[in-house]
Image (cartoon, rainbow, N blue to C red):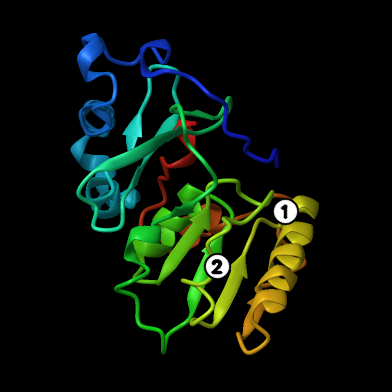
Amino acid sequence: NTDYKPMKTTLKNTKEVALPKEAEKDLIAVAKELHGRLVNKISNDQTNNLPFKTFKEELVGYSKNKQFVFPYFNDDKSEVTGIKYHKPRPYSTEGFKCTWYLGWYLKDYNADKPLYICEGEKDAIVLKESGFQVVSSSNGAGSLPDELDEIIKFECIFVYDNDEAGEKGALKHALKIKKVSKNTTVKIAKWNTDLPKGYDVADDFVKINKSDTYFFDEFD
């Protein structure tokens, strides 16, 4: 599992949409364009096999390079502050820094319920679709955002990938939260030992899906 490291790039270099120079910073237009591409790619008979409701809510997109694309919003979700292009060659729009994916919901989450912290956006999408309070770091297992004050009021449960990077990252990040707030309850979810290396929340979606056909990972 390769840690995600944002790299600087201008929107005109993403080669995803042709926008005039004055509109290069109109990230919401880019997000909607790429989301439309994902919607067009998904046929009606596939929607039951995907977290489609959350795809629409979060304007998840799909690039010409066959990457999932995840817009990041401001706190009231009125604007897109950055766009992250997923594997196999992850990169982001210029000025993007480590932050919480789905962090715009933190102010609305119930502090009496656990907050699940996933390793990546795809995992977070699946848990949100299933009704969980969830965020993920844009840097995956590599690092957490500096803004920890907004999560220490929750019981934090790390659900990282079933591999060495995920295990080490979860432990490192759990200790970081405890260092900031000793009173915060922090837990690390453990996958069953018979599961394959790299198994994650998105993989587990297959097991709870009612259909035998699964398309989520086939897009990557």
In the picture of the structure, the residue carrying the numbered disc 1 is: 196
User: Looking at the image, do the residues carrying marks 1 and 2 touch, with CB atoms under 8 Å apart?
Assistant: no
Residue drawn 34% across the image and 40% down it: 81
Q: Could you say which disc has been placed on residue 21 in the image?
A: none
> 182 or 55: nearer the eye?
182
In the picture of the structure, the residue carrying the numbered disc 2 is: 148
Q: Quadrant of residue 37?
A: top left
Q: Quadrant of residue 157?
A: bottom right
Q: Is residue 138 left or right of residue 12?
A: right
C-alpha separation, residue under disc 1 versus residue under disc 2: 32 Å
Q: Is residue 24 above or below residue 142?
A: above
Screen quadrant of the N terminus: top right
Q: What's the amino acid at mark 2? A: Leu
Q: What's the amino acid at mark 1? A: Pro
Q: Is residue 172 left or right of residue 75?
A: right
> 87 or 175: nearer the eye?
175
> 128 or 152: nearer the eye?
152
Find residue 86 and report its horizontal and vertical position in percent: 50, 33
Element carrying mark 2: loop
Give the mark, 1 or 2, whose residue is nearer the N terminus. 2
Find residue 90 and report its horizontal and vertical position in percent: 55, 29
Element carrying mark 1: loop
> 2 or 10: nearer the eye?
10
Residue drawn 76% across the image and 67% down it: 171
Find residue 127 and report its horizontal and vertical position in percent: 42, 63
Q: Is residue 105 above or below residue 20?
A: below
Q: Residues within 10 Å of mark 1 (few under 14, many from 20)?
A: few
Residue drawn 42% across the image and 51% down it: 212
